[in-house]
Amino acid sequence: MGKSEEFPELSDTNWLCDFAFAVDIFSHMNELNVKLQGKDQFAHDMYTNVRAFKSKLVLFSRQMSNKSFAHFPTLAVQKEAARNAKKYCKSLDDLHREFCRRFCDFEKIDKSLQLVSCPLSQDPESAPQELQLELIDLQSDSVSKEKFKSLKLNDFYASLNETAFPNLRRTAQKMLVLFGSTYVCEQTFSVMKINKAHHRS
């Protein structure tokens, strides 16, 4: 029995195109997944990667509508790729909408995330009033600038004087704890699985 008889899908050019599209788009999603993993991930860093992926989806859809498969190498070699391009555009648009829906809450706090992530480059006048004077003091302090370059974000804010920067510290604490326990939880469950497997063997 030949492969085409055992797996009739392999003779279906449309199925092969769908499969190739899935391979490529899951490859892109896996790249995003890897970027979102690991410790010391600040919420703004994670959301920046998500936002970049959303922009990539827009680019993919636009190029796909022009029958360009530059970022879909597996699909590009399929003979029926161009004929199915419109269907894949819809899939990409649907995926983009789903990402927008799932991460809509981050849009509301994006300015706060940016402020905490890059306080030295923020315009004090556009910041909340309670942070404006503290931002000016921070941006004028050469010692704080050096600390920001050399320390991790959470260590930097911990090093700020509580009396001089109470509101900045408070805002940073709120933002920094958004995903503070995620990595710890993942690591704990991984260790538990390893220990469970060890005891079974």
Image (tube, grey):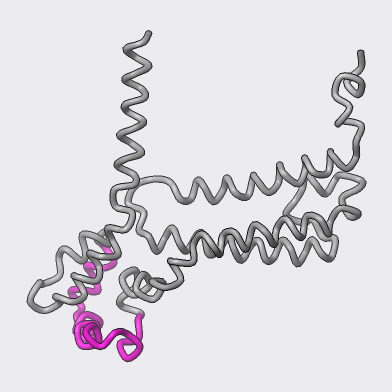
Q: At x 78% / y 55%, what residue is drawn?
A: 88
The residue at 20%/66% (across/down) is: 157
Q: Main secondary structure of the magenta part?
A: helix
Determine whether 134 is above or below 56 in the image.
Answer: below
Residue 183 falls in image quadrant = top left
State left or right for residue 196 relative to residue 86: left
- The residue at 20%/78% (across/down) is 142
Residue 19 occupies which quadrant of the picture? top right
Screen quadrant of the N terminus: top right
Where residue 66 sits in the image (x, y, percent)?
84, 65
Indicate yes or no whether the magenta region holds residue 147.
Answer: yes
Please state the horizontal and vertical placement of residue 118, each as a whole percent of the image.
34, 72
Residue 161 x, y percent position in the rendering: 10, 72
For the C terminus, the quadrant is top left
Outermost residue on the top side: it is 201
Q: Is residue 136 above or below residue 86?
A: below
Range of the magenta residues?
122-150
> How many numbered markers are drawn?
0
Residue 50: image location, x then y, percent: 51, 60
Residue under the point 83% across and 59% down: 86
Front residue of this view, candidates 97 and 23:
97
Q: Is residue 61 left or right of residue 4?
A: left
Compared with 182, 55 (above or below) is: below
Q: Is residue 94 above or below residue 73?
A: below
Hey, which quadrant is residue 128 in on the image?
bottom left
Asked whether residue 129 is drawn in magenta, I would say yes
Please, which residue is most extreme toward the left here? 163
